[in-house]
Image (cartoon, helix red, strand yellow):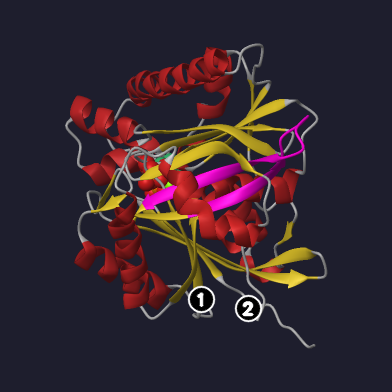
Amino acid sequence: MFTKKTPTIGLDIGSSHIKGVQLKSVGKGRELLKFDIQPIKSGLIENGVIVDKKSLTDYLHEFFRKANFIKNKAVIGLSGQHSLFIKRITVPLMTEDELRLSIKYEAQQHIPLDLDALALDFHIIGKVPHSDNEMEVLLVAVKKDLLQDYVEVVQNVGLEVVIVDINLFALSNMFEFNYGVPEERNVALVDVGANITSLCVIQRGLPIFWREIPTGSNYHTEALERTFNLTREDAERLKRGHPIEGFNMEEAKSVMLKASDEIYAEIYRSLEVFRSNFYNEDVSKIFLSGGASLIKDFATMLSHRIDIIVEVIDPFKKVLIPQKLIPQYIKEIAPIASIAVGLALREIEV
Ligand SMILES: Nc1ncnc2c1ncn2[C@@H]1O[C@H](COP(=O)(O)OP(=O)(O)OP(=O)(O)O)[C@@H](O)[C@H]1O
Ligand SMILES: [Mg+2]
């Protein structure tokens, strides 16, 4: 049968920037068709929840008006500790179809919430070691109204939503595609956005621990605004290292470092929780992504503070970027595209 891959758009709607990635399959590899990023006004999304659908729709319209995507199908991702429930559970050995029929029953044993308000999904991890009749499953539950809001804003701009993923899984999907299974036993993927830091510990290719921390690079922006009485726009410029007239860069740097320290402390705390939950395990390396990783020295200082090797992720490591898309520019801001790349990799066959 003749099949063709649809270049779905991986659409990462963050609280500060919309990111879109479209990939083309070339044999087993991928080529970048399009990447775009545009800022949105702050306050439209809080803790992963859309608080102003109308304005967000307007920004999405603007995003697609300016960026020249082949508009058709989209894969979107969700994040936010309050609306997502992810748990690794053990169930009797069964087929995927059987599990689909019984997932609500299984979920009842693990989720202390009204299941009618939740959309359920799962991912079979594999057989429980040393057991003939049990398997491990990643159970995912999302508030239906949150999911519906995201689908609605994307449909409003004329796109069909084909998959709703979880940003953390998109991140690990992107990582596996580009980096395979790392030689270290446990590595952590850490995406520091504007409002949310997503952290996921991967053990031999499988996610075993995750956290969504309500912390991000807005700490930097807000600290600069507060300390120097700046507008948000000027604080954003300063944060990216663009000098502002009459301004002492050294002072700005120390304010930035203080804000970074608060983020590092949260990452450290989450790793402590991991260590206490998984006796005898530790993380040997962090792969960092998200907008904050573009801040000068952010990754280096993180490594110093928590004494773990930190590498900034390149989500296009195994993606060919054609010359006409200006690879130098894309590589410079690549870490901010990590989740969008993970979403775009979830292409479907038609
Ligand atoms: N060169 C840069 N380009 C864009 N954003 C940058 C840059 N340097 C730092 N940042 C900061 O990174 C953040 C945006 O990162 P990202 O797009 O990953 O967040 P987001 O997905 O919008 O937010 P969240 O996931 O927390 O909702 C902003 O706080 C922004 O100021
Ligand atoms: Mg984000």
Is residue 33 in view?
yes
Ligand 2 within 8 angstroms of badge 1 C-beta: no
Q: Position of residue 197 (x, y in %)?
A: 43, 35
Is 321 left, or right, of 148 in this rendering? Answer: right
The amino acid pointed to by label 1 is Lys
SS for dot 2: loop
The amino acid pointed to by label 2 is Thr
* Residue range corresponding to the magenta coloring: 121-142
SS for dot 1: strand
Q: Which mark is residue 73?
A: 1
Q: Position of residue 271 (x, y in %)?
A: 52, 20
Q: Quadrant of residue 17?
A: bottom left
Q: Are marks 1 and 2 in contact (CB under 8 Å)?
A: yes
Question: Quarter holding the C terminus?
Answer: bottom right
Establish if 273 lies above or below 186.
Answer: above
Residue 133 falls within the magenta-colored stretch: yes
